[in-house]
Image (cartoon, rainbow, N blue to C red):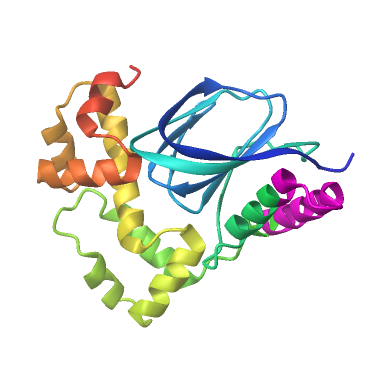
Amino acid sequence: MMPRLVSVEVLPRVRSFPTHEHEEWELILYTEGHGIAAVGEREIPFRPGRLICVPPHVPHEEISESGYRDIYIQAENLPARETIEVVEDTTDRRLFRLAMMLHDEAHFKPPGWETGSQELFDLFLFFLRRGQEPKKEHALVARLKNLLVEHLHDSAFSVGEAMSAIPMAPDHLRRLFRQATGSTPVDYLSELRVAEAKRLLKNGDLCVKEVAALVGIPDPYYFSRVFKRVTGGRPSSYLNNAPR
């Protein structure tokens, strides 16, 4: 059976959405704010331009201390996948523009809107699948990613100095890196550090200050700002509420 659009809605700005699940697939494209989406057993940071494909009957919820907005599309008959897909929108926001066109077509209902909505949805899926296709990673991008992982715990590590040591113009390297990962090198390192911090906080044996030092951000106040920027919440709140 062919994929079929069920509905498309724009979520007003909220700080959280409680655990729920659907009979259909849900494609959630985040348009404002940062936070965490708990999808099944995974915790996925979200930010503007990130899309999460939630399969049917998978419980999911979202939380953002500063608030967020998204566009969500429900659909039937999408191909089954073994993993939850996370896709980044293109730099020209193609998925966002198509989603808004789809929303307007489905809600304003001009003549022929049913056919038009399905055709727009098919085009949306075309670009979504393109974003899911594995791309051969540039060797220098892979080299920079490895450096970021290796120096995750090093507070003296400088992303700028690491990029300068790679034989490629920094601006071009930054563009290639963002195309490959959806993040700048600085943001990628922040996400790595926050992911490691969450793992340490979950154990419950360390305070926020100790965790901050272990992930290469010895200033706890700056660490708190980085943590909130990535997850939408403060590390102290995560420490108190993290499942053990």
Drawn side of residue 102 relative to residue 177, left or right: right
Can you say whether 145 is above or below 104 in the image? below
Q: Which residues are magenta?
A: 105-128
- Quarter holding the C terminus is top left
Report the residue at 69% width, 34% height from top: 25
Residue 202 at what x, y percent from top left?
A: 29, 25
Q: Main secondary structure of the magenta part?
A: helix
Report the residue at 60% width, 38% height from top: 84
Residue 152 at what x, y percent from top left?
A: 26, 50
Drawn side of residue 178 relative to residue 189, left or right: right
Residue 130 occupies quadrant? bottom right
Drawn side of residue 205 relative to residue 182, left or right: left
Can you say whether 243 is above or below 17 in the image? above
Residue 97 lies within the magenta run? no
Residue 119 at what x, y percent from top left?
A: 81, 54
Report the residue at 85% width, 53% height from top: 111
| Residue situated in front as seen by the camera: 110 or 114 | 110
Report the residue at 30% width, 33% height from top: 198
Number of numbered discs present? 0
Residue 121 lies within the magenta run? yes
Residue 162 occupies quadrant? bottom left
- Quarter holding the N terminus is top right
Drawn side of residue 31 relative to residue 104, left or right: left
| Residue situated in front as seen by the camera: 25 or 119 | 119
Residue 68 at what x, y percent from top left?
A: 41, 41
Can you say whether 48 is above or below 212 in the image? below
Q: Residue furthest top?
A: 244
